[in-house]
Amino acid sequence: KQEVTQIPAALSVPEGENLVLNCSFTDSAIYNLQWFRQDPGKGLTSLLLIQSSQREQTSGRLNASLDKSSGRSTLYIAASQPGDSATYLCAVNSNSGYALNFGKGTSLLVTP
Amino acid sequence: GAVVSQHPSWVICKSGTSVKIECRSLDFQATTMFWYRQFPKQSLMLMATSNEGSKATYEQGVEKDKFLINHASLTLSTLTVTSAHPEDSSFYICSASGSGVLGDTQYFGPGTRLTVL
């Protein structure tokens, strides 16, 4: 069974810092991997989706990389802002049409 | 495009009552819908997968007689929590995937906060 782990569980950084969130998964046979943002008490906002054949995806200050063979993905946030404070979830899709396997998330706090 | 709505956004009910949660794909036809549950400080856990017109497939440990799922049309799936108890209090989120130009990307609803007193 696919297991997804996210490290660290929580992170606090001052505004302006660049930071990296880590995600690892146990079964490298994945279809795609997705990073989400979740604000307290709210639903999910999709940030980046990386197909299994891709190495990275970028959107604005966000960059996600995927190393399928080692079962790892990282989410890089450049020049962090207080508005980036949220929980970031990594989710792995093992096959087309399948449900996502989520990690427990990294709770990020960016202080002014 | 590709918007998924959920109703209600929150609900408070007494123990023993039943609660129905709706998940709608507003601008696409959802061939598959997924129901997840999220307890405080935990991640999303899949409860069941439903395909339009067929019976839902439940994950191990999820009681199908307690969590009734109906996916009667390509735009609507419902989750009914029967005889709800306080331990059912959770955040329920659905996702929907379509076909064609949408591919198999899953689009998530905003979630429903259920509190059982």
Image (cartoon, grey):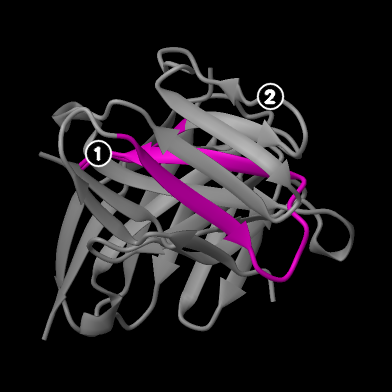
Relative height, residue B109 to residue A24 (above, below):
below
Q: Quadrant of the C terminus of chain B?
A: top left
Q: Residues within 10 Å of mark 2 (few under 14, many from 20)?
A: some
User: Does residue A54 lie above or below A98 as drawn?
Assistant: below
Q: Is residue A93 left or right of residue A31?
A: left
Q: Nearer the viewer, residue A1 or A38?
A: A38
Q: Amino acid at mark 2?
A: Lys
**Secondary structure at numbered mark 2:** loop
Residue A102 visible at all: no
Which residue position holds label 2? Answer: B55
Q: Position of residue A4 (x, y in %)?
A: 44, 33
Q: Which residues are magenta?
A: B18-46
The residue closer to the viewer here, A38 or B22, is B22
Looking at the rendered structure, the kind of residue marked 1 is Phe
Which chain does the residue under circle 1 lie in?
B
* Residue at x 52% of width, y 83% of height: A60
Residue B7's disc number: none
Q: Position of residue B92 (x, y in %)?
A: 37, 45
Q: Which mark is residue B39?
A: 1
Q: Can residue A91 be spotted in the picture?
A: yes
